[in-house]
Image (tube, rainbow, N blue to C red):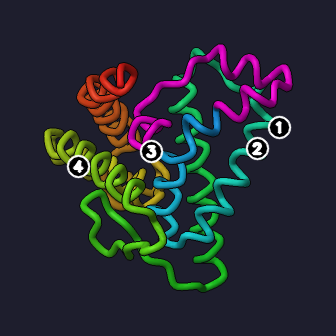
Amino acid sequence: MDTPSQQAASTIDPALLARVVKGDVQAFSQLYDQSSTLLYSLALRMLGNKEDAAELLQDVYLEVWRKVSRYDVGRGSPLAWLITLTRSRAVDRLRARISRGQHTIGTSIDGANHVPDRGLNPFEAQADQEIRALVVGALAALPPAQQEALELAYYQGLSHMEIAAKLNQPLGTVKTRIKLGMSKLRESLRRYWEQGEHL
């Protein structure tokens, strides 16, 4: 049986999504097995609550089942699509909390203000720590302006326009920083993902 870190590190073959589009339940189950640990960790980190993260994950996979035909391989890998979908739904929930006046705990890449979830089993916690350490290292290697833009976008859930206003920078500059930063992160982490395929 794969460990959570192996599941998180595995890449998802676009052909698997093609089978899900055709209603293949076994392919959907395989997709879940390959991606759920990573997506749950992301949701938990953003929402700070185990139950909310589990509920969000259920919603994400329901949406994947219904809308998988909209996935476009030309716009990114299947895993990137799933991460973007999860992040987007988590940001929606955080904004809904704010509009209802509920207190939220923000997170950052270094874990500041993060509330540890004691419900994770040791394997999930270790996998999360390994992934976090890799991302922190890759992020630290970026120029400070790119680091800041990525943290605001992916850990505080701000839109490009909101980041531009907060940093008092042109929108085009913010978009370029995020795009360059993500490209450098992808390249830095590529070896880890590729190594995971052979475990």
Compare marks 4 and 2 and give the one earlier in the sequence: 2
Residue that lies at the very extreme toward the right in this rendered image: 23
Mark 3 element type: helix
| Residue 95 in the figure: left or right of residue 158 | right
Viewer-side label of 1, 4: 4
Residue 54 in the image, given as x and y percentages of width and height: 63, 62
Which image quarter is the C terminus in? top left
Q: Which residue is mark 4?
A: 133
How much space separates mark 3 and mark 4, taking CA atoms?
15 Å
Residue that lies at the very extreme toward the front in this rendered image: 1
Report the span colored magenta. 1-30
Q: Crowding at label 4, few (<14), some or many (≥20) Cα neighbours within 10 Å?
A: some
Which label belongs to residue 4? 3
Viewer-side label of 3, 4: 3
How much space separates mark 3 and mark 2, taking CA atoms?
23 Å
Compare marks 3 and 2 and give the one earlier in the sequence: 3
Q: Which residue is mark 1?
A: 66
Residue 167 in the image, given as x and y percentages of width and height: 30, 57
Mark 2 element type: helix
**Three-letter amino acid code at disc 2?**
Glu
Q: Which residue is mark 2?
A: 63
Q: Residue at x 45, y 28 (%)?
A: 10
Mark 1 element type: helix
Q: What secondary structure characterizes most of the magenta part?
A: helix
**Three-letter amino acid code at disc 3?**
Pro
Q: Which residue is at the front of the view, 187 or 153?
A: 187
Q: Are marks 1 and 3 in contact (CB under 8 Å)?
A: no
Q: Crowding at label 2, few (<14), some or many (≥20) Cα neighbours within 10 Å?
A: few
Q: Residue at x 70, y 35 (%)?
A: 29
Viewer-side label of 4, 2: 4
Residue 90 in the image, given as x and y percentages of width and height: 58, 58
How much space separates mark 1 and mark 3, taking CA atoms?
26 Å
